[in-house]
Amino acid sequence: MVGIMAATVILAVLPLLFILLNLIAKGAGSINWAFFVETPAPAGQSGGGVGHAVVGTLIIVGMACLMGLPIGVGAGIYSAEYPANRLARLARFVADVMNGTPSIVVGVFAWTVIVANQKHFSALAGSVALAMLLIPMVMRTTEEMVKLVPNSLREAALALGYPRWRTSLRVVLRTALPGIVTGSLLAIARIAGETAPLLFTALGSQFFSINPTQPIAALPLVVFTYATGPYEEWHRLAWATALVLIIVVLVLSLAARIATRQRFTPNA
Amino acid sequence: MAESLTGEALVSPPRSLVRASYGDRIFKGLLTLAALAIPLLLGFLFIELVSGSRLAIARFGFGFITRSTWNPVTEEFGAFPLIVGTLLSSFLALLMAVPLSLGVAIYLTEFAPMLVRKPAAFLIELLAAIPSVVYGLWGIFVLIPILRQTVFPFLQSLLGFLPFFQGTIYGPSMLSASIILAIMVMPYIMSVSREVLLAVPSSQREAALALGATRWEAVTSAIVPYARSGIIGAIILGLGRALGETMAVTMLIGNRHAISASLFAPSYTMAAAIANEFAEAVADIHLSALAYVALVLFGVTVLVNAGARVLIWRVTKRGVPGGHL
């Protein structure tokens, strides 16, 4: 029985290795300078890149961070610093529920709030959807990180005459900051790979654009459109784009893992 | 910095106390706003979904859930095949993922050599970090060819007497989507069950071992029963993920509005229908019907997730009253 269970571990790790190897085999060859700076070649022709989607993803994710991070971090500090409070408990529960809400549903929300009123697709609508996904993730990590700050630090600052808000900002938050940053990076990596909420908000585009009120390209959208498209050349770009996405996500995950392990090991 | 502040506090306590209380109030006020934003956003999301689906609710009512026609031309919409597709694909995914993830979680908390426990758990959790659309890409170009050429024909020759494995073999199908879903939800179930199992007090394990149980007996008689409601919570959490999973399923399920007994046939899910049709829908009633689908999906996942959270909290925060043996 134990042998069978050991085998389940191997079976569970297998897809990860398989996916990574396939991505490298099919995507690595297409990654070069042009891939990052050019726009796609016209359908059927070879060459071109996904520079427009790199810019688009940076813009969408950047705006989502501007909207989502302050709320997420603030709510996280609140529920860690006033944990028994009724609002803290409610926010925690709702954040967990929001974490489980399908991203496509959040996309529909962003559509009804922004696209339906604006009458056209826009990068901003995509950012709103991604911010909605970012907030609960960031809130929960911030809360965990702030909770890990030893109470003695808080008490020492208060005993020195620091008011509570300065204690929270200059002592507690500063101590927890590396953890909050890495946790937020992880959440950002997660939303950078989201496709579903962008399908009918940011929509995608074949051109360079930095206008937040217009449709914009994004890396995950490129993977989806090109993977389901008919051309061999598109499939090549889809694999390369997926490889870039995966590298971003995995590097951030590993960095977050290593950073948090060094900072906080409460039991080990 | 600290010295000047302490000095200041000693010299003029009233002024600094007044300032501190202002600062505290502003600080707490800002934090409260942020914390309030979260429930408000969820409420806003719910209201927007309801208002977006108003037209469809008025036209089709609750019958929407049980009707099977989906015809944008005649403007007849019923979500029954989508709901069945969502439930069935999630159920099949859990059928594959649950034994696997529980096996891994139990092995990694109870039996594995200390050295491999954390790295193995980390590798599996990395699966959860892979974007859904990458699973879809991999599914289309790697998984489906393998399934269609070798695995599905083999299943058909072995279990062809069952209606589920009869009929034409398509690549994009209910079974392909369920397999990719199983891979995707496994890390969630594994990781939460592992946390729950780690939260079982070691007295539980030691008592069983002291009574002469083998390590395996200790797991089945003392540890797993103690963690039972948490493990069920982990499974329900995985179910929530599977129900709402969009991109990989959209790319692998074949997208056909129909219910079919064969798992080799293309099907559809709620999330996939929204993903495919929302950007292209022009008629208001079509958009509204899709928003209605989103509302149903939202309702189902909220219920599922809230249930899972309650079960997990019972184990990890308070312990299970009477959950022993």
Image (spheres, coloured by chain):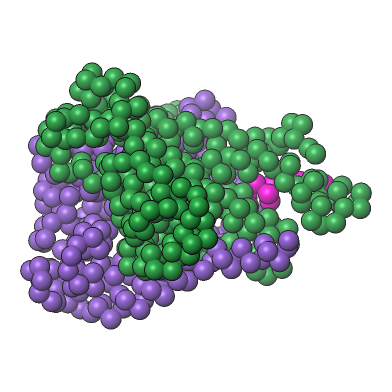
Chain colours: A purple, B green
**Residue A39 location, x and y as percent?**
12, 68
B213 sits left or right of A32 in the view: right
- The quadrant holding residue A118 is top left
Q: Quadrant of the N terminus of chain A?
A: bottom right
Near-viewer residue (A46 or A159): A46
Say if the magenta span includes residue B198.
Answer: yes
Q: Residue at x 43, y 35 (%)?
A: B301
Q: Is residue B130 left or right of residue A114?
A: right
- Dominant SS in magenta: helix
Q: Nearer the viewer, residue A77 or A36?
A: A36
x, y percent for residue A23:
36, 72
Residue at horizontal 30 percent and vertical 75 percent from the top: A27
Please give left or right for residue B159 compared with residue A213 in the image. Answer: right
Q: Residue sitting at 86 percent across and 48 percent down?
A: B208
Q: What segment carries the magenta color?
A: B194-203
Q: In the rendering, at what x and y percent does residue A193 appear?
A: 33, 57
B321 or B317: nearer the viewer: B321
Residue farthest along the left direction in this orientation: A42
